[in-house]
Amino acid sequence: MSGSGPKQLAYSFPFKYSDQKCDSFNLNITDYFINNEAIGYKAPQISTGEKTFNQFIAKNIVYPGDAVRENIQGTVKLVFTITKDGNIENIYVQEGRHILLDKEAVRVVRKLKLLTPPIIKGQNQDLCVSMPVSFRLQ
């Protein structure tokens, strides 16, 4: 019998934990991937077509098999920078849940590619983003 078995994920990249907080211009943005015309904010566009960060996460997340077997769930809070060039940089785990979930959350955000940068009042801006990635077993 042949078959590829479960997909092996690459977790060999370096990542860090940090208590860094975001204070990006004190913008009071609740969703960094939705325009907010009241404050002159134009959200970055995700290259694969998802309209929100949560849609991107839902499409790309793989629940680690060991976490499923051990019934590990919870929310990992990440902090990262979207640069004025539209790149994702400086990804940190701000609040981890378990090493397996932390690594998967970082892996998925590393896959995030943008077509456009964040724009505030007509200017491309670096933006510090704080986002939760939730892992829930059904």
Image: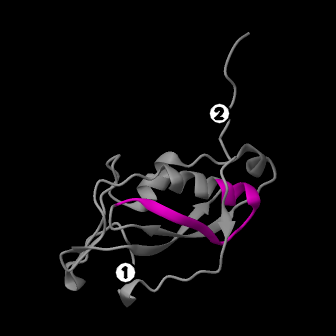
| Res. 7 mark | 2
Residue visible at 18% across and 75% down?
A: 122
Residue 137, can we see it? Answer: no
Q: Earlier in the sequence, mark 1 or mark 2?
A: 2
Quarter of the image for residue 25 reads bottom left
Reply above or below: 5 against 18: above
Taking depth in this image into account, of 107 and 76 the one nearest to the observer is 107
Q: Residue 29 carries which label?
A: 1
Would residue 117 appear left or right of 87 to someone viewing this image? left
Crowding near the residue tagged with mark 2, few <14, some 14–19, many ≥20 C-alpha atoms within 10 Å: few
Per the image, label 2 sits on a secondary structure element best described as loop
What is the x, y in percent for residue 26? 39, 90
Residue density around tag 1, few if under 14, some if 14–19, many if 20 or more, within 10 Å: some
The CA distance from mark 1 to mark 2 is 36 Å
Q: Residue 76 location in percent, x, y?
A: 63, 67
Please check the rendered image and state whether residue 126 is part of the magenta-colored stretch, yes or no.
no
What stretch of residues is rendered in magenta? 86-103
Task: Confirm whether the magenta stretch covers residue 92.
Answer: yes
Identify the element where label 1 is drawn. loop
**Residue drawn at 69 percent across, 46 percent down:** 12
Find the residue positioned furthest to the front. Answer: 85
Residue type indicated by callout 2: Lys
Residue 59 point in image, percent of width and height: 47, 47
Closer to us: 125 or 114 = 125
- Residue 134 shows up from this direction: yes
Amino acid, disc 1: Ile
